[in-house]
Image: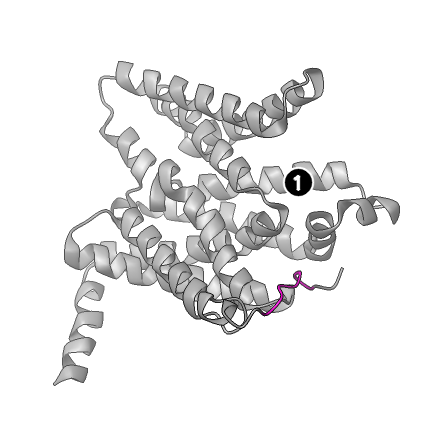
Amino acid sequence: MDTLAIWQWLIAPLQYEFMLKALIVSAFVGAVCAFLSCYMTLKGWALMGDAVSHSVTPGVVLAYIFNLPYSIGAFVFGVGSVLAIGFIKSKTRIKEDTVIGLVFTGFFALGLVLISKNPSNVDLLHILFGNVLGISTGDMIQTFIIGSITLVTLLILRKDLLLFCFDPTHARSIGINIVALHYILLGVLSLTIVAALQTVGIILVVAMLVTPGATAYLLTDNFDRMIPLAIASGVFSSVLGTYISYYLDGSTGGCIVVTQTLLFVVAMIFAPKYGLLKQRSGSPAVEIEGEA
């Protein structure tokens, strides 16, 4: 009886086309974000991800006002925020974390002002908080195209990006253009945020860009194992979160992120080498390993 109940719980949402679309898109976006999150974790770019995700808000609103694709406005302002951070950092004595906070709060505030002045802001709120249950076929195709560009870029530059994140000084010494890799990674970050807009929204996308990688980082010392663990975490939490949102009638993006956070908490407590339960033995931590 219990097995039958679980089977019915799994099958019931699949009767609806909107749920099938939501599950497919959520799983794909979860995988893309999880792959990138491994590099974000190694690089320590959680704040940068937060900055870019919030900075795309005015671009989304302006695209909505001028009846343009959201992706164009979001990408332009995402890249613009990165350039603004780099320009201010190079021209002033202000530290990078302060510059990031300055830029992303300024851009996000501008977006909120534009939203408040726009008479039809329902769709814009969906962009802020996600609306994967209402995603159209056209938006699905756009998400898959953008996400695929991210995946291909990360796969082609996997080893160079690993060395750049792990030891940029060594990368420079062997002739790798770390400036180019820096901006490529930021560009991929902007694209990933655009791909995740309708799944979890601007507000929560940073969690998808950080949590899977952080979870996998607790479970392994090897980067080659870290990537599949992060992707498995991202896909599982995206699918389970979408199911939970269906039965709770709650925010899909919120349910996905809460599920990811719970997985991180489980890993933090029970990780075989770095979990809180293991820390009592006083085992020393070691750095992540990977092939450059």
Image position, residue 122 (x, y; %): 22, 29
| 240 sits to left or right of 37 | left
Question: At 64% from the left edge and 57% from the top edge, which residue is drawn?
Answer: 155
Label 1 environment density (alpha carbons within 10 Å; few <14, some 14–19, many ≥20): some
> Badge 1 is on which residue?
184
State which region is magenta. Answer: 283-289
Residue type marked 1? Ile
Residue 138 seen anywhere in this rendered image of the structure: no
Rendered-image quadrant of the N terminus: bottom left
Rendered-image quadrant of the C terminus: bottom right
Image position, residue 186 (x, y; %): 60, 38
Q: Is residue 138 above or below residue 109?
A: below
Question: At 60% from the left edge and 37% from the top edge, which residue is drawn?
Answer: 187
Q: Is residue 46 above or below residue 2?
A: above
Image position, residue 47 (x, y; %): 52, 37
Snapshot quadrant of residue 124: top left
| 224 sits to left or right of 264 | right
Question: At 24% from the left edge and 61% from the top edge, which residue is drawn?
Answer: 243
The rendered magenta stretch, by its main secondary structure, is classed as loop
Q: Nearer the viewer, residue 119 or 139?
A: 119
Q: Nearer the viewer, residue 99 or 287?
A: 287
The colour mode here is one colour
| 32 sits to left or right of 91 | left
Q: Is residue 120 above or below residue 272?
A: above
Magenta-span inclusion, residue 146: no
